[in-house]
Image (cartoon, rainbow, N blue to C red):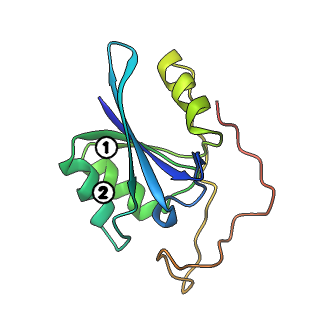
Amino acid sequence: MKIAISTDDGRVSEHFGRCPEFTILEVEDGKVAGKEVIPNPGHHPGFLPRFFHERGVEAIIAGGMGFRAQQLFAELGVKPVMGVKGSIEEVSRELLAGTLQGGESLCRPGGGKGYGLDKTECTHPEGEKVRSA
């Protein structure tokens, strides 16, 4: 099973589409069999769901993601898990232990603010706490 995690400086990124990179974990027999960190290949409507689906990713983990992106992932059979915080190591341990829990998306984009890598604002409340496990 392949799982992609939106990543920013070794932690789960709160902003899925604008994260600088993704960590892709290959999980086999309850262990991480492979780990790859790739730069964000770009963010425009519908691209990332197709990109990860074509690479065999079965789940995407992020702090926040827009509703449309969540829909596109789900339509392609890729399970979006939102509301996750923590280091990639912590999240990996929780994932392998079966204790990783998602929640509500941390990022709630508003109309007209843009969604690209260069977006400088998000509408989630500063300091909002969301459980990572």
Q: Quadrant of residue 15?
A: bottom right
Percent x, y of residue 8: 57, 55
- The quadrant in which the C terminus is found is top right
Tags 1 and 2 touching, CB below 8 Å: yes
Location of mark 2 (residue): 49
Identified at 33% across, 52% down, the residue is 73
Image position of 13 (left or right of 81)? right
Percent x, y of residue 93: 55, 23
Q: Secondary structure at mark 1?
A: loop
Location of residue 110 with respect to 40 vertically, above or below: below
Location of residue 46 with respect to 116 vertically, above or below: above
Location of residue 31 with respect to 21 vertically, above or below: above
Identified at 36% across, 70% down, the residue is 42
Identified at 46% across, 64% down, the residue is 17
Q: Secondary structure at mark 2?
A: helix
Location of residue 104 with respect to 132 vertically, above or below: below
Q: Quadrant of residue 46?
A: bottom left
> Which of the marked residues, 1 or 2, is nearer the chain's N terminus?
2
| Circle 2 residues within 10 Å: few <14, some 14–19, many ≥20 | many
Residue 112 appearing in the image: yes
Image position of 39 (left or right of 101)? left
Report, in whole angstroms, how far the alpha carbon at label 1 lies from the one at label 2: 8 Å
Q: Amino acid at mark 2?
A: Pro
Frontmost residue, 43 versus 41: 41
Frontmost residue, 88 versus 102: 88
Location of mark 1 (residue): 78
